Amino acid sequence: MISFNALKINIISDICNFYFRNLGYILSDIDYQHNTVPVLWKNGIGQRLTDGSVSAKAFSVFVSDKDVYVAGGKMDTQKNLIATLWKNDIAQNLTDENNTALAFSVFVSGDDVYVSGYVINAEDKMVAVLWKNGIIQRLSDGKNDAVALSVFVK
């Protein structure tokens, strides 16, 4: 845990790089040993989402009951970008090292968790995707770059 008062690490992202959601949650990044580390803040207390051994980025936070979900991505040790969903600080890879991907938004409705983002196809095009409970659905045909930046379920 880190706090605003005890933060001795250089924060590299500007204040616009976070996203507000219920209960005063904020996302930001810190620079830690030459890697970007996403930090989830609540009431002035920050919790790193990774250990800093690889770079990662978080874009969206959603609170459902007592569960906190964060969408983003992290590099694996071979520098492949993997779409990632954190639930209560526990990372779940949405893709593997064979698919460069990134998650931008998360929304929870009942027992269903929706995450939007993109994967890179064999033609090196971004394909807009939606994961529902970890199962991927392609939203575009992959002929042109497309990204799903946000998800909302009514």
Image: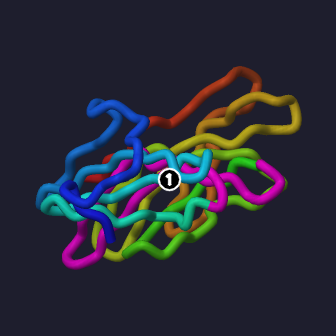
Task: Kindly identify the residue that appears in the image at 57 percent across and 67 percent down.
Answer: 134
- Quick one: 21 or 8, which is closer to the camera? 8
Q: Please tell me how crowded label 1 is: few (under 14), some (14-19), or many (20+) other residues with Cα within 10 Å.
A: many
**Callout 1 amino acid:** Val
- Residue 98 percent across, percent down from the top left: 84, 54
Q: Is 15 colored magenta in this rendering? A: no
**Residue 113's quadrant in the figure?**
bottom left
Instruction: Give the residue pinned by disc 1.
Output: 37
User: In the image, is 52 to the left or to the right of 46?
Assistant: right
Question: Can see residue 90?
Answer: yes
- Quick one: 84 or 145, which is closer to the camera? 84
* Magenta span dominant secondary structure: strand
- Residue 126 percent across, percent down from the top left: 69, 32
**Residue 65's quadrant in the figure?**
bottom left
Task: Kindly identify the residue that appears in the image at 16 percent across and 59 percent down.
Answer: 44
Q: Residue furthest top?
A: 144
- Residue 152, placed above or below residue 142: below
- Residue 82, placed above or below residue 148: below
Task: Kindly identify the residue that appears in the image at 54 percent across and 57 percent down.
Answer: 131
Quadrant in which the N terminus appears: bottom left
User: In the image, is 11 to the left or to the right of 99?
Assistant: left
User: In the image, is 16 to the left or to the right of 35?
Assistant: left
Q: Is 59 colored magenta in this rendering? A: yes
- Quick one: 15 or 140, which is closer to the camera? 15
The residues colored magenta run 53-79
Task: Kindly identify the residue that appears in the image at 60 percent across and 45 percent down.
Answer: 102
SS class of the residue under badge 1?
A: strand
- Quick one: 6 or 81, which is closer to the camera? 6
- Residue 9 percent across, percent down from the top left: 40, 50
